[in-house]
Image (spheres, rainbow, N blue to C red):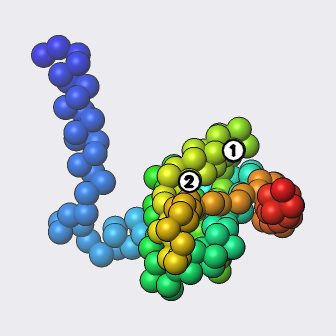
Amino acid sequence: MSESVSSSCQNVVELSGFRVNNRHTNSQSRKRARAVSQRGTADLFSMRRHLAYQASVEIDEIVLVKAGLSASAKRRIATRVRALLDKEFGKLRVHRYRSVYVVRHQSVEALISSLLRVQFHANQILISVESDELTSPAKSVSITWGVGRSTSEAEVERLRRKRQKYRQ
């Protein structure tokens, strides 16, 4: 037999020794269980805690209120914005806290570029304005975001941008 065939047979034989078999006595299985428990336990690794940058994203409520939208229409818009965030970042990196979305990412450049894409696509969502005027243009969904190394830094940056946006 060639060496490669014999080594592959040998690996199969070695792996078969790890199977739980009815032929083993109870004392052997207890010894094996003790050996496994003495190795230690596994720790759960949370990616969320190890992502360096955070973003705070908010749908600008002023535009929605001026449009006179119902609660169900606001929920539909929030669902569409959440879908944009999930598509860009993945469902596990986006969390909602009250009316603010929190996004975590390892790279600040990638985070900001993705937020800009979400902002662009959110602007494509048109809100039908219920008004008596015939010339009232349709509004688009506006979001404000801020980025920082912590949630509080991201919140402060988002609020600063929001104040700046509505001063203009």
User: Image quadrant of residue 19?
Assistant: bottom left
Q: How many marks?
A: 2
| Left or right position of 127 against 55 | left
| Residue 105 percent across, percent down from the top left | 66, 50
Q: Position of residue 66 (x, y in %)?
A: 64, 76
Report crowding for label 2: few under 14, some 14 to 19, many 20 or more residues within 10 A (C-alpha): some
The residue lying toward the viewer, choosing from 69 and 2, is: 69
- Residue at (53% x, 76% y) in the render: 131
Instruction: Give the quarter of the figure containing the C terminus.
Output: bottom right
- In the rendered view, tell whether residue 118 sits above or below residue 82: above
Comes first in the chain, label 2 or label 1: 1
Name the side, left or right, on which 161 lies relative to 41.
right
Horizontal relation, residue 154 to residue 56: left or right: right
- Residue indicated by mark 1: 112
Toward the left, the furthest residue is: 1
Residue most toward the top? 2
- What amino acid is at disc 2? Asn
Which x, y percent locates residue 16?
A: 23, 49
Q: Position of residue 104 (x, y in %)?
A: 66, 56
Q: Is residue 100 visible?
A: no
Q: Secondary structure at mark 1?
A: helix
Residue extending farthest bottom: 71
Residue drawn at the location 26% of the way across and 71% of the way down: 25
Q: Do the CB atoms of the residues marked 2 and 1 lie less than 8 Å apart?
A: no
How far apart are the alpha carbons under marks 2 and 1? 16 Å
The structure residue drawn at horizontal position 48% and vertical position 58%, both measured from the top left corner, is 125
The residue wearing badge 2 is: 123
